[in-house]
Image (cartoon, rainbow, N blue to C red):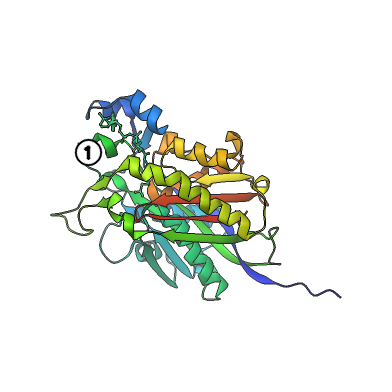
Amino acid sequence: MVKTDHIIRSQIAGIGSYLPAQVVTNEELAARVDTSDAWIRERTGIRQRHIAAPHESCAFMATEAARAALADAGAHASDVDAIIVGTATPDQAFPSVAVRVQAAIGAGGFGFDLSAACSGFIYALSMADSLIKSGQARGVLVIGSEVYSRILNWEDRGTCVLFGDGAGAVFLRAGEGAGRGEDRGILSTHLHANGQYGDMLYVDGAVGRPDRPGHLVMQGNQVFRHAVTLLSETVNEALAANNLPQSAVDWLVPHQANLRIIDGIGRKLGLPPERVVVTVDHHANTSAASIPLALAEAWRDGRIERGQLVLMEALGGGLTWGSALVRM
Ligand code: ACO
């Protein structure tokens, strides 16, 4: 009898999301700052964003997305061993958003937040994969939740038009694979950071300081210049690590910062636009929430199916960047 190698794989069992009810269009922003729908659409692809109401805190949205992911997986709070929340906009310095979610859903185990700006979900997915592979957890909620509306300078047209609020979550379960590209689950993650670029994109204040909450400051064109190059490198790295050709990718689910960056990566991968999940037009940039929000949308409407290969990538403040290759 031929012996097969069995390895632990972190498999996506369920996906969920939450978006605030309030939608703000480009035209509405143009009434507040010196901008136009045409400029925003042409430079970014954004036409609207969701903005949180006072009760829609980072933890509230994370909890709603987590509940939806567990329901999608047919799982319960008792199946959750760990909760990781990627966020740059926690409601408080501590306790973490993760333990607020834990209390709200009635889970045990442990939880923590992770700060990697727009790469937060990829970083969190990678940490969850390590916890599962090392046997420390069998069920992990990985959440991206952001309320950027609270750290935007609403008088700075260069940044306030770019971001939106929302949350997305996946529930990962330990499964088995043979160590090959056909396995279901996370095939690989690759993380990078370069702190030399820390001042390219930052918040000039502190979490939990109502007197100095801080605003997002970004040299957008500098970030843009690095984005396509670094993201192309990391998606190629993901495919090479798994010995898979570009043509094996069924879906690109990128971080949603700018349609021009997304199109650039899609073209480099040789993927037709209909194989790239785009939500930046109706969600804007929701930072760590953007990938799970996009994943949830394409999963719910049936575009992404079980067994398909999904490539995710993100770049954000830090600079941080990375990729995850997942067979659904
Ligand atoms: N409306 C009208 N004009 C504007 C606006 C606006 N909302 N914003 C800027 N402008 C003007 C600028 O003042 C400038 O005018 P000037 O030439 O007279 O000085 C002109 O438009 C061009 O500005 P740029 O910043 O060079 O425009 P660019 O084409 O680079 O687009 C953008 C800006 C959309 C921000 C783009 O650079 C971008 O998407 N960058 C990447 C953002 C990103 O990926 N961030 C990482 C994730 S975010 C995170 O981690 C939190």
Location of residue 48 (image quadrant): top left
The extreme left residue here reads 211
Q: Position of residue 214 (x, y in %)?
A: 20, 51
Of 122 and 240, which appears nearest the observer?
240
Residue carrying label 1 = 154
State whether residue 254 is above or below residue 185: above
Q: Quadrant of residue 12?
A: bottom right
- On whether ligand 1 comes within 8 Å of the CB at mark 1, the answer is no
- Give the image location of residue 130, x and y in percent: 52, 69
Is residue 304 rendered to the left or right of residue 26?
Answer: right
- The amino acid type found where label 1 is placed reads Trp
Q: Nearer the viewer, residue 263 or 305?
A: 263
At 50% across and 63% down in the image, what residue appears? Answer: 126
- Which corner quadrant holds the N terminus? bottom right
Residue 161 in picture, x, y percent from top left: 31, 35
What element does badge 1 sit on? loop
x 64%, y 50%: residue? 309
Residue at the image point whose x is 84% and y is 74% from the top: 2
Circle 1: is it few (<14), some (14-19), or many (20+) Cα within 10 Å?
A: some
Looking at the image, residue 38 lies above or below residue 211? above
Depth check, front residue: 236 or 156: 236
Decide if residue 141 is in sight here: yes
